[in-house]
Amino acid sequence: MKTAIAKWGNSLAVRLPRHLAEGANLTAGSPVEIWVENHSLVISSTRPRYKLSDLLQKHKAAQQHGETDWGQPMGDEAW
């Protein structure tokens, strides 16, 4: 498929056709990474990577809950 580069303020832009965006699971605001490789522009979707230590950084002891007793195993569960 061919398309054209458009001017967007002081930058350039490429409009992604709907079927390509859906095929790459992209929506408005989706984070992407862009780089040049062998004189070609490459666009790749990215997903945030979280570390457990970062997620638990704001965790407070008061938010810690005890274990829940679900009773004796029933059926073929492996406890």
Image (cartoon, helix red, strand yellow):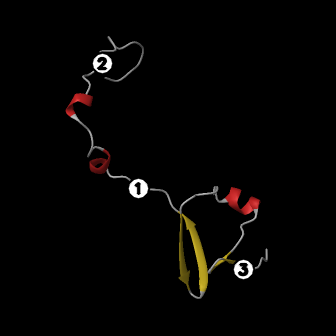
Q: CA distance from mark 2 to mark 3?
A: 58 Å
10 Å crowding of disc 2: few (<14), some (14-19), many (20+): few
Snapshot quadrant of residue 26: bottom right
| Residue at left offset 41%, top offset 18% | 76
Q: Position of residue 6 (x, y in %)?
A: 72, 78
Residue at which label 1 appears: 49
Q: Is residue 72 left or right of residue 24?
A: left
Q: Are marks 2 and 1 in contact (CB under 8 Å)?
A: no
| Residue at left offset 59%, top offset 57% | 29
Instruction: Judge whether 32 appears above or below 62 on screen.
Output: below
Q: Position of residue 75 (x, y in %)?
A: 42, 14
10 Å crowding of disc 3: few (<14), some (14-19), many (20+): few
* Disc 2 residue type (three-letter): Thr
Q: Nearer the viewer, residue 40 or 71?
A: 40
Q: Nearer the viewer, residue 50 or 72?
A: 50
Residue at which label 3 appears: 5
Q: Position of residue 5 (x, y in %)?
A: 72, 80
**N-terminal label among 1 and 3:** 3
Residue at which label 2 appears: 68
* Disc 3 residue type (three-letter): Ile
